[in-house]
Amino acid sequence: MSAHQFRFLTASQIIRLYETNIIRARPTQATYLESAVFSPQQHMHYGQNDLFQLASILAQKITLNHAYQDGNKRTALIAANMFLQLHGYQLRWHSLPATKSMTRLRTLMLLLQRDNGMLSSWQASIRV
């Protein structure tokens, strides 16, 4: 997929995802959410064209920026998943045994704070 075809989520779309999936609340640090939203676009501008890397960059920035009082990691995964869905990918969560999947996901969320490459590799491995 060429870089000019990427569709990026907006801060207002992520706010709606948060309100729909987590709790009806606004970010306590709206500028941090804006910063997280623009990070994948900046990476793309400097040559990153891997869709899964861009999704994991979005997730990492939402996680680390703490725009919300609660639910930042959940919001990060939901936003990254939605970004991939916008580009035609579904993640096969059901294909992994539930306990193994959740254990792996917890580990990945901890690693996400340091290395977004692990999350992008995992997302690519369970895509449809």
Image (cartoon, helix red, strand yellow):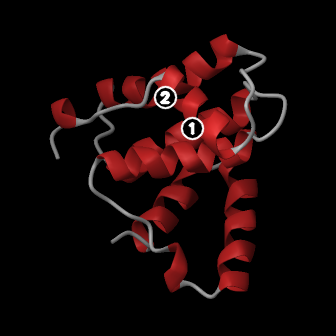
Residue 55: x percent and y percent?
A: 45, 45
Q: Which image quarter: residue 2? A: top left
Judge left or right: residue 60 versus residue 82.
right
Residue at image coords 28%, 49%: 87
Up-down relation of residue 114 to residue 88 (above or below): above
Q: Are marks 2 and 1 in contact (CB under 8 Å)?
A: yes
- Find disc 2 in the rendering and name its residue: 13
Q: Residue furthest top?
A: 31
Q: Is residue 11 visible?
A: yes
Give the label on residue 74, or none.
none
Q: Amino acid at mark 1?
A: Leu
Q: Quadrant of residue 105?
A: bottom right
Residue 56 seen: no
Q: Secondary structure at mark 2?
A: helix
Q: Residue at x 57, y 18 (%)?
A: 35
Disc 1 designates what residue? 17
Q: Residue at x 65, y 42 (%)?
A: 75
**Mark 2 Cα shell of 10 Å, populated few (<14), some (14-19), many (≥20):** few
Of residues 10 and 41, the one nearer the viewer is 10
Q: How far from the left and from the top, in percent, is residue 93?
A: 53, 73
The amino acid type found where label 2 is placed reads Gln
* Most foreground residue, 82 or 113: 82
Q: Is residue 39 above or below residue 63?
A: above
Residue drawn at (38%, 69%) of the image: 127
